[in-house]
Amino acid sequence: MNFSPAADFYDKTRGGEARGRRIAPAIAERTAKDRLLLDAGMGTGVVALALTDLGYSVVGIDLSHSMLTKAVSRVGQTAAAASLTALPFPERTFSQVYSVWVTHVVGDLRKGLQEVHRVLEPGGRYVVIPGMILFDDHPVGRIMEEVQSRTAEADDRAERILPLAESVGFTAVEVGELDAATHEHSPEQIASGLEQRMFYHLWAVDDAVFEEKVAPLVRELRALPDPDRPITRRTRRQIIVLEKRG
């Protein structure tokens, strides 16, 4: 999926540079500062910027020219327009690669994993933070999880990634969770965001499918008590570390 349609609002609706600073330490803990790091799907560059500020040398790729324009303004001319499934690098170029909120929108995830495996040295690491969200048990969280399950075409949680990764020559060395993120929105704000198709998995949903699968959940959000009152919710993401077998 090409995120060019979201380039102008992506940072405003996803936390921007603050979100990058929150995620970067998890990447830093699992990679070496003295080696070049590939951001495979860098988007607007918020994670790459945070890692650069921590002293890392980062290069990146992304499918969207519009997103890359934002990234280049942050991290400089260290990015290339390319897909995860066709990386523009020779074999064994890198010893470490990461992808943050990327693998859920890769059309052929096995091919993407093969490509990362190809450009890694033996023993190299691929750190993945999947895009699929783990929601809390709040009524809003349960509704959002149902929206995600009804409309997201690809599930990139560990139970799907690990068999594919093993099949192309990776070994999983870690499967865990990041610290939960806190969000404060009212049910009405979330309902409005769904109607405006602010979530990537709704971009390709036509009006008839939206009316069938999503509109009932929008109505459930608005039927909750005090729908205009902000609610604090917690969401979690997995983190997966894969190692290329020698």
Image (spheres, rainbow, N blue to C red):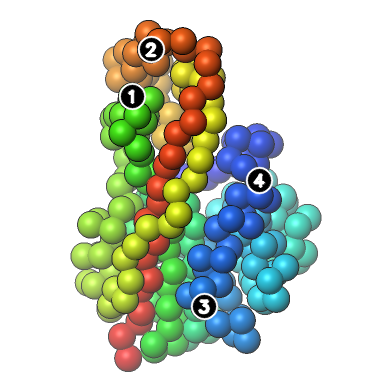
**Residue 139 disc label:** 1
Q: Is residue 231 above or below residue 6?
A: above
Cα distance in 3D space between marks 1 and 2: 8 Å
Give the mark, 3 or 4, whose residue is nearer the N terminus.
Answer: 4
**Residue 118 disc label:** none
Cα distance in 3D space between marks 3 and 2: 44 Å
Q: Residue at x 72, y 51 (%)?
A: 69
Residue type (three-letter) at the residue carrying disc 2: Leu
How packed mark 4 is, by other alpha carbons closer than 10 Å (few <14, some 14-19, many 20 or more), is: some
Q: Residue at x 66, y 49 (%)?
A: 18
Cα distance in 3D space between marks 4 and 1: 27 Å
**Residue 16 disc label:** 4
User: Which residue lies under the disc numbered 2?
Assistant: 224
Cα distance in 3D space between marks 2 and 4: 29 Å
How packed mark 2 is, by other alpha carbons closer than 10 Å (few <14, some 14-19, many 20 or more), is: few
User: Which residue lies under the disc numbered 3?
Assistant: 31
Q: Is residue 164 above or below residue 46?
A: below
Q: Which of label 2 and label 4 is nearer to you?
A: 2
Give the mark, 4 or 1, whose residue is nearer the N terminus.
Answer: 4
How packed mark 3 is, by other alpha carbons closer than 10 Å (few <14, some 14-19, many 20 or more), is: many
Q: Which of label 3 and label 1 is nearer to you?
A: 1
Task: Classify mark 4: helix, strand or loop.
Answer: helix
Q: Is residue 75 above or below residue 120?
A: above
Residue type (three-letter) at the residue carrying disc 4: Gly
Q: Is residue 168 left or right of residue 4?
A: left
Q: Which of label 4 and label 1 is nearer to you?
A: 1
Give the mark, 3 or 2, whose residue is nearer the N terminus.
Answer: 3
Q: Nearer the viewer, residue 121 or 131?
A: 131
Residue type (three-letter) at the residue carrying disc 1: Pro
Give the mark, 1 or 2, whose residue is nearer the N terminus.
Answer: 1
Q: Residue at x 39, y 89 (%)?
A: 122
